Amino acid sequence: MVHILETGFESMETSPQNPNGSPKIRGYNIIGGQLKLASDGSTFVSTNPAWLEDELGEFPLSTKEDVRDALAAARTAFPSWAATPAPTRGQIIGNMGRLLMEHKDEIVRLQSREIGKTLKESAGEVQEAIDTCLFFQSEGRRLYGQTVNSELPDKELFTYRRPLGVCGIINACNFPSAVPFWKMIPAIMCGNTCVWKSPQDAPLLSFALARIMHESGIPDGVINLVHGKGSGAGQHLVDAVDDGLVNKISFTGSTGVGKMIGEICGRNLVSCSLELGGKNPLVIMPSANLENAVTGAYWAGFGTAGQRCTSLGNLIVHESIYDKFLEMYMNKVRTTKIGDSMRHEDVLYGSMLSEKYAKDFLKGLDMCDASGAKRIHGEGRITEASAPENFLGSANEGVYMWPHVYVDVTEDMECFHEEIFGPVVTIVKAKDFDHALHLANASPYGLSSAIYTNDRLEAYRFKTGIKAGMTGINNSTTGAEAHLPFGGVKGSGNGTRESGIWVIEAYSYWHAVNDELSGKLQLAQMDVDEIEIEEAEVDYGSLA
């Protein structure tokens, strides 16, 4: 094995310093345990969205040839890794968790620097990656099959879980440490090998995480990392399905791209896991504790600058409490502290993930305005001339957005149905519970959902009537734990799940074994001795 984390993060090759004194990193693909540049020498730069002058590093812009090399390395490593006992695979995964704990502080700061997420949120996300490792370490001793009784004598029936083969892993940059671990840890636990296309906006973090994975003791070729754009390396990875080089695609991202991946996998009968977008509803009913509801709706809408697939989309408020709730909610929105958490304390959210995400968000705001919704807070991108009262720092340094609130939103508006990835909440008025539930189900998505109510019947009717993969009762739309299934329905996914024991179904198949011990051919349903049923004489009249 090539040890590529010899002295922690200090072994990373560095180039000249940034204006803030931090080093620029020379990043690499990791293919078959070897550090590789792009085959044609092309590169791209990772930039801190909270401080645009801060360039973190330069990374390979991977070609089709690079992706094919990574797939070949994964296929070469597969037979040996699949034959490795599951408890041994689990032990290596446990090592990953311990190395993540050892380097947690460095990883947290690196992630916040690369994507602008607050230090507190980054710490929670890295902890989720740790939790995933520790959970699946023990699953190495519980990768159970079954012993099934045969209908014939001297015959044993068994079921086993078998790995699929080579898995292509593509994740978005808003959760760049938790989500790849959600995908790759159960994949390798089941005996698969992986080619991971890192998010374009988080290559340095991905590089560091891949190095930790290798230092944990994983054999070369089991996890291979390629950098690049979604339209480049990502597309090359998906296209390889048509050539029979990929046995599984796991993708987190937009619904449009997910549908394209699903079509390619479908025509090749290749398994795919699709975790896609959301327009997550949160309902506020009259019996709710309004202070608690305001806090939950505020975090759901503006935590991570609204850049979660589980962020609040439509805030559905019962008309009898609408005015009171809106006043309380807007008082909180107006106090929002925004800034770079690496330089300022107690900010709710930081920058957008990148300039690209900022541009897409502004298009979403244009859609809200064109739909006829009424904007009561927010002025687009934060500038020196237009900044909220509690914005900290210099607006020109990074890519920051106001928190936005739209009211008078109705079901016939485009902004009611479409996901807008950023700090914006669209507020809808509901006449009663049935109307609120209808509105919650009316968008084409079904990822997360929530209701605030102290009426237990309403809570029950909501959780049984909502069409979503996840529901919070007196809690926000965001949040997940490493041992719960994560995923959605309708336009939010294809029914597969991340996390917990349920994800094992996505990375393995059932193998049924028929072990004949009798020394002769016995055929089920044909050679079974019939059992004669004797007619019993019953006086039915006496039973009356």
Image (tube, rainbow, N blue to C red):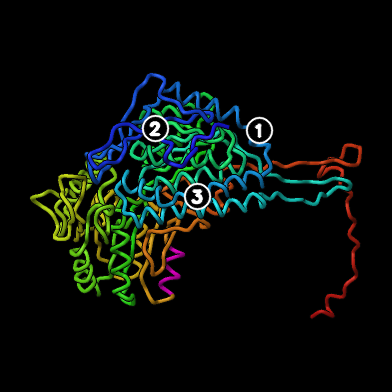
Q: Is residue 286 left or right of residue 93?
A: left
| Disc 3: which residue | 498
Q: Which residues are magenta?
A: 457-465
Q: Quadrant of the C terminus?
A: bottom right
- Label 3 sits on a secondary structure element that is loop
The spot of residue 136 in percent (x, y) is 58, 51
How many neighbours does mark 1 have within 10 angstroms: few (below 14), some (14-19), or many (20 or more)? few
Residue under label 1: 80
Q: Is residue 266 visible?
A: no
On the image, the x and y values in percent for residue 224 come to: 50, 33
Q: Is residue 458 magenta?
A: yes
Of residues 372 and 85, the one drawn nearer to the viewer in this rendering: 85
Task: Look at the picture and state if 465 lies above or below 36.
Answer: below
Residue pictured at 27% horizontal, 61% vertical: 346
Q: Secondary structure at mark 1?
A: helix
Q: Which of the two discs, 1 and 3, labels the residue nearer the N terminus?
A: 1
View extreme (top): residue = 40
Query: Residue at label 2?
Result: 13
Q: Amino acid at mark 1?
A: Ser
Q: CA distance from mark 3 to mark 2?
A: 34 Å
State which quadrant residue 543 falls in.
Answer: bottom right
Residue 540: image x %, image y %? Answer: 83, 75
